[in-house]
Image (cartoon, rainbow, N blue to C red):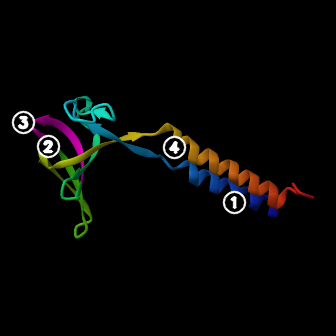
Amino acid sequence: MKSILKINVVLILVFSFSLFSCTSYKNVVESSGPDKTSGIPLETLQPGDKVKITKKDGSKVYLVFERVEDSQIFGEIHRDSAASGSFKHYDSSIPLEEIQQIELKKFSLGKTLGIPLGAAALAFVLYIMAFGGAFS
């Protein structure tokens, strides 16, 4: 009975770690800017891309990219309304001159696979060490 409980605990841990999906942010640069080789060109952003914008005043804006037009970036901002418990969506534009940094949210296969596989390996090693008599 204890053996089944131990296996179930390990399986629950492995399964819970497998639910993680990891993303990372990649720097977006203007093709005419000084650091044009150190990131993704602004022109390659597609409608629907999720971006994080850091403004020169230090504030951050998360939006779903729509387009760049007339030196402004347009997109839809999603804000959580704590009072109603719902999300508000509204279109917004930010002048490029007010932007310090733009980052594109990208899915990372390495992180997504690495975390659960690493956790599974660690759980397996700990299980063997604790219950398998690996050192006896």
Label 1 sits on a secondary structure element that is helix
User: Mark 1 — residue?
Assistant: 9
Mark 1–mark 3 distance (CA, rounded to whole Å) = 57 Å
Task: Pick the quarter of the image with the N terminus.
Answer: bottom right
Q: Is residue 67 left or right of residue 130?
A: left
Could you say which quadrant of the image residue 38 lies in? top left
Is residue 4 highlighted in magenta? no
Inspect the image, locate mark 2, and give the three-letter code of the amino acid beneath it: Leu
Q: Earlier in the sequence, mark 1 or mark 4?
A: 1
Residue 20 percent across, percent down from the top left = 51, 50
Judge from the rendering whether residue 77 lies leftward or rightward of residue 38; answer left or right: left
Q: Could you tell me which quadrant the C terminus lies in?
A: bottom right
- C-alpha separation, residue under disc 3 versus residue under disc 4: 37 Å
Q: Which residue is mark 3?
A: 70
Q: Is residue 102 visible?
A: yes
Q: Is residue 63 magenta?
A: yes
Q: Tell which circle, 1 or 3, labels the residue nearer the N-terminal end.
A: 1
Q: Are marks 2 and 1 in contact (CB under 8 Å)?
A: no
Residue pointed to by mark 4: 111
Q: Give whichever of discs 2 and 3 has the lower sequence position.
A: 3
Mark 3 neighbour class, 10 Å CA radius: few under 14, some 14 to 19, many 20 or more: few
Spot the residue most to the left.
Answer: 70
Camera-near label (1 vs 3) is 3
Classify mark 4: residues with Cα within 10 Å, few (<14), some (14-19) or many (20+): some
Measure the C-alpha gap from mark 2 to mark 1.
Answer: 51 Å
Callout 1 amino acid: Val
Please tell me which of labels 3 and 4 falls first in the chain.
Answer: 3
- For the record, the magenta segment spans 61-73
Count the numbered circles shown.
4
Residue matched to label 2: 96
Who's the residue at 19% across and 46% down the image?
76
Q: CA distance from mark 2 to mark 3?
A: 9 Å
